[in-house]
Image: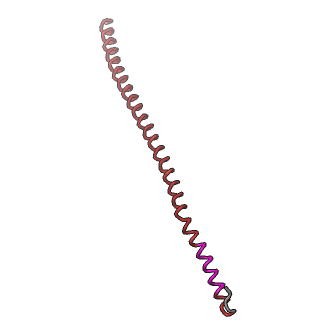
Amino acid sequence: MTLPKDFAQLQNDFNNAIRQLRKTLAGVNEAPTISQTGASEIRAASNDLAERTQHQASTIGESAAAMTALTDAATETSRELEQLSGRLRTSMAMRAGALT
């Protein structure tokens, strides 16, 4: 449809506004898809982080159990060495008394 020459600028501005509106609506239409993709990526990263954290916690638990076992073994060895030291002192004292 052709308008009188006096309205040509108005027609041109109107057509430009309609084009811009179409672009804007197309962008709004794409926004949920972009948001959904971003949310899926965040969910995947969060799940990955949770799995790694759980694995690390398990490893720390195993390390703590191993350290406890090592500490217990060292404590028992220390007790045994104290008993042996006491027996050696007693034996040396008895020998010293027998020599005099």
In front here: 13 or 3? 3
Q: Residue farthest to the right? A: 5
Q: Which residues are magenta?
A: 11-23
In front here: 28 or 87? 28
In the rendered image, the vertical position of residue 21 relative to residue 41, given as above or below: below
Residue 85: x, y in percent?
Answer: 35, 18
Q: Residue farthest to the bottom? A: 6
Task: Say how the picture is coloured.
Answer: secondary structure
In the rendered image, the vertical position of residue 87 relative to residue 54, given as above or below: above
Q: Residue at x 56, y 65 (%)?
A: 30
Q: Quadrant of the N terminus?
A: bottom right
Q: Quadrant of the C terminus?
A: top left
Residue 20 highlighted magenta (yes or no): yes
| Left or right of 3, for residue 59 | left
Q: Residue at x 38, y 26 (%)?
A: 74
Residue 9: quadrant of the picture: bottom right
Q: Residue at x 68, y 92 (%)?
A: 4
